Image (cartoon, rainbow, N blue to C red):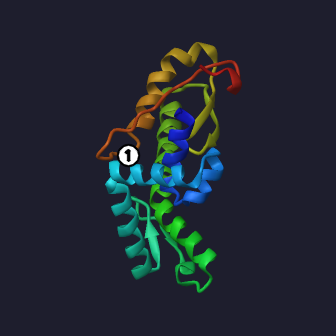
Amino acid sequence: MRRQAKTVNFAVIYGMSDYGLSRELGIPPGVAKRYIESYFNEYSGVKEYAARTLDFARENGYVESLMDRRRYIPELNSPNRSIREFAERAAVNMPIQGTAADIVKLAMIKVYGELQRLGFKAKLVLQVHDELVFDVPEAETESLVPLITECMESAYKLEVPLSVEVKCGKDWCNAQ
């Protein structure tokens, strides 16, 4: 059930069709359509956001992250329906994904600065989407967890709080 709910959430945000959702979840298209309609009934702001964002993109030829990073999308005017629909999905997604990418970059800079300032030996070794992976000497773990959490949660102020979950382990697979 959780997997289905998560799939519906991302499918709707990314503009998946009833047919696409039915194939993804292995359910009849009519059921998928009801899932999507229920989602939009419950979260009407999502549909309004998508319409507003598409109107802006069509009028201006670009969309922006919250930090004013632009992505130009000339394909919105394509006569090819598939290309145009892909561009529409990109226009709706970019402000969300672009802002998330901007925030994680700010968090990386903030964490790096604090590690240097406080003389920690820990190293930031990898960034995957909204996740940062560190190589941390065991003796520093207890001090670093709250520091990294604070740096990431305060990287950028939004109307909703950012929440960070830190996991520790000998390797990435065993992080808890």
Residue 73 vs 138, above or below: the answer is below
Taking the view exactly as shown, the residue that stands out farthest to the top is 139
Say which quadrant the C terminus sits in: top right
Taking the view exactly as shown, the residue that stands out farthest to the bottom is 79
Lateral position of residue 107 relative to residue 79, left or right: left
Identified at 53% across, 54% down, the residue is: 30
Residue 164, image x and y in percent? 45, 32
Residue 25, image x and y in percent? 62, 45
- Say which residue label 1 marks: 156
Lateral position of residue 161 relative to residue 70, left or right: left
Residue 131 vs 40, above or below: the answer is above
Crowding around mark 1 (Cα neighbors within 10 Å: few <14, some 14 to 19, many 20+) is some
Q: Nearer the viewer, residue 168 or 13?
A: 13
Identified at 38% across, 54% down, the residue is: 40
In the picture, residue 162 is in which quadrant? top left
Residue 63 vs 168, above or below: the answer is below
